[in-house]
């Protein structure tokens, strides 16, 4: 078989093939023989039907089988002789069974990107110190105490900072409803009823709580606040909202005593000391997960920054669509209207596209690192993960195994485990410096 490869941008390649007459006849003879051994033709014993009759009776099937075999052989030859890393056959066209007995065709391929890996071992990363301090442990215990707190009504005095104010409020901008001027503003920015507000500067909008200090149950206050420059919604920043606020009640938070009785309510049968030990272990585990995430992100960021190569755009587009669907679904669950989603569709698509490009690029990088380091997944590891998935979904392992076999699910699980092991390798190979948590915020 004669093949000619033309490499194209965006990880595509054109494979033009020609099967000489001799090779084409030989391949057809094999296929005709297979048909003859199985065909039941009246007047002929199985396997004794003349080839000419078989070729005439099953012409379409024989040609289809021939074309499939030839394309498969051509792709295999291109993989071996031209060192093409072929992801898939995108299209087969211009197939021709020529009068001279040759066969020609053009095959469009999607290939993996070609690039040389930069240094990926010993990448310098900074991570926060893992130790849990007594101060941090006490803060976590206080947060738990707040979950068990009681709230008593305060009679006869005005609201102060650190109290809880129960309020109704409604905002306007230059006399118009907030939603009318700022359609993208969250509903809670416009109005609310029976809202419990912790009287602290960081609560709600800057200056809102300060404007309520001194108000008593039943009082009404007019408060003007400006949305700060660090507010999540960029289009909302700088706008001044005039609020009318009615006090519906003032409450005082009463925290439970930090003792064994409290510990037993949090975790049955545990003393305060045991609760502290349990909480410390949980915090250390969370910090370790956070450290792993920081190491992973820094390593991948630095590897990505040193590489630039074409990506298969069809794969990127599929990943982009998947991420668009996720963003739309997430926004819908948060109560964002369909109209607002449509208005922001260009931004959604742009964000999804940027995420997809980075994700696809990183996947190819990790696969090449896995190849370079000969990282494999054992049968035991694969079956162990299948058992974990089955247990998590409360599904019998045999049933899940059959489902995975039908859907080529084992390949996806294998690839996922291989990527995880590659990330573990990169973390272990990184040069880690522990720093104060403040130095890793960026």
Image (cartoon, grey):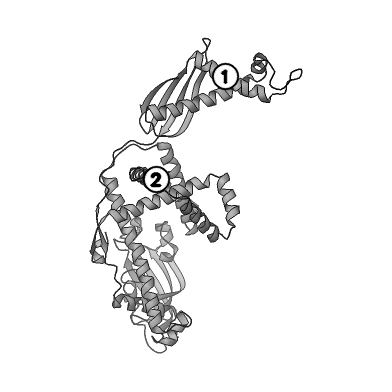
Which of the pair 14/101 is nearer the observer? 101
Residue 380 in picture, x, y percent from top left:
48, 53
Residue 66 in picture, x, y percent from top left:
55, 22
Q: Residues within 10 Å of mark 1 (few under 14, many from 20)?
A: some
User: Horizontally, is 329 left or right of 199 in the view?
Assistant: right
Residue 176 in picture, x, y percent from top left:
41, 61
Q: Residues within 10 Å of mark 2 (few under 14, many from 20)?
A: many
Q: For residue 223, what is the image quadrant?
A: bottom left
The residue labelled by disc 2 is 356
Q: Earlier in the sequence, mark 2 or mark 1?
A: 1
Q: Nearer the viewer, mark 2 or mark 1?
A: 1
Q: Quadrant of the N terminus?
A: top left
Dots 2, 1 in contact, CB < 8 A: no
**Residue 64 shows in this picture:** yes
Q: CA distance from mark 2 to mark 1?
A: 45 Å
Residue 435 is marked as none
Which of the pair 353/381 is nearer the observer? 381
The residue labelled by disc 1 is 28
What SS does tag 2 mark?
Answer: helix
Q: Quadrant of the C terminus?
A: bottom left
**Residue 324 shows in this picture:** no
Rendered position, 244 above or below 426: below
């Amino acid at each position: 078989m004669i093949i000619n490869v033309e490499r194209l941008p965006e990880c595509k390649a054109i494979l033009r093939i020609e099967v000489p007459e001799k090779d084409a006849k030989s391949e057809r003879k094999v296929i005709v023989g297979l048909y003859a051994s199985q065909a039941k033709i009246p007047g002929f014993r199985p396997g004794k039907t003349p080839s000419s009759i078989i070729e005439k009776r099953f012409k379409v099937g024989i040609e289809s089988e021939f074309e499939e075999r030839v394309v498969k052989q051509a792709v295999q030859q291109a993989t071996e002789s031209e060192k093409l890393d072929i992801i898939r056959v995108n299209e087969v066209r211009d197939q021709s069974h020529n009068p001279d007995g040759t066969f020609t065709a053009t095959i469009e391929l999607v290939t993996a990107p070609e690039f040389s890996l930069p240094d990926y071992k010993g990448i310098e990363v900074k991570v926060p110190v893992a130790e849990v301090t007594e101060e941090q442990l006490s803060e976590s215990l206080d947060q738990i105490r707040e979950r068990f707190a009681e709230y008593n009504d305060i009679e006869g005095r005005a609201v102060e900072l650190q109290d809880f104010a129960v309020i109704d409020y409604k905002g306007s901008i230059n006399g118009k409803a907030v939603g009318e001027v700022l359609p993208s503003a969250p509903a809670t920015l416009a109005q609310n009823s029976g809202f419990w507000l912790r009287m602290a500067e960081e609560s709600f909008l800057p200056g809102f709580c300060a404007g309520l200090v001194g108000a008593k149950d039943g009082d009404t206050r007019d408060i003007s606040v400006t949305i700060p420059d660090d507010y999540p919604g960029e289009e909302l920043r700088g706008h001044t909202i005039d609020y009318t606020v009615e006090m519906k009640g003032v409450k005082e938070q009463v925290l439970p005593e930090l003792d064994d009785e409290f510990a037993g309510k949090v975790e049955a049968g545990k003393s305060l000391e045991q609760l502290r030990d349990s909480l410390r272990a949980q915090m250390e585990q969370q910090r370790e997960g956070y450290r792993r995430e920081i190491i992973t992100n820094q390593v991948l960021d630095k590897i990505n920054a040193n590489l630039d190569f074409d990506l298969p755009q069809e794969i990127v587009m599929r990943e982009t669509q998947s991420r668009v669907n996720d963003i739309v679904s997430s926004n819908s669950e948060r109560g964002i209207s369909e109209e607002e989603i449509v208005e922001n569709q260009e931004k959604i698509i742009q964000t999804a596209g940027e995420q997809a490009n980075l994700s696809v690029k990183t996947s190819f990088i990790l696969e090449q690192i896995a190849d370079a380091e000969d990282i494999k997944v054992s049968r035991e590891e694969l079956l162990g993960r299948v058992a974990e998935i089955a247990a998590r979904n409360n599904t019998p392992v045999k049933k899940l195994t059959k489902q995975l076999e039908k859907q080529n699910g084992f390949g996806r699980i294998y690839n996922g485990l291989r990527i995880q092991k590659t990330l573990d390798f990169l973390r272990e190979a990184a040069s880690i410096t522990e720093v104060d948590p403040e130095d890793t915020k960026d």
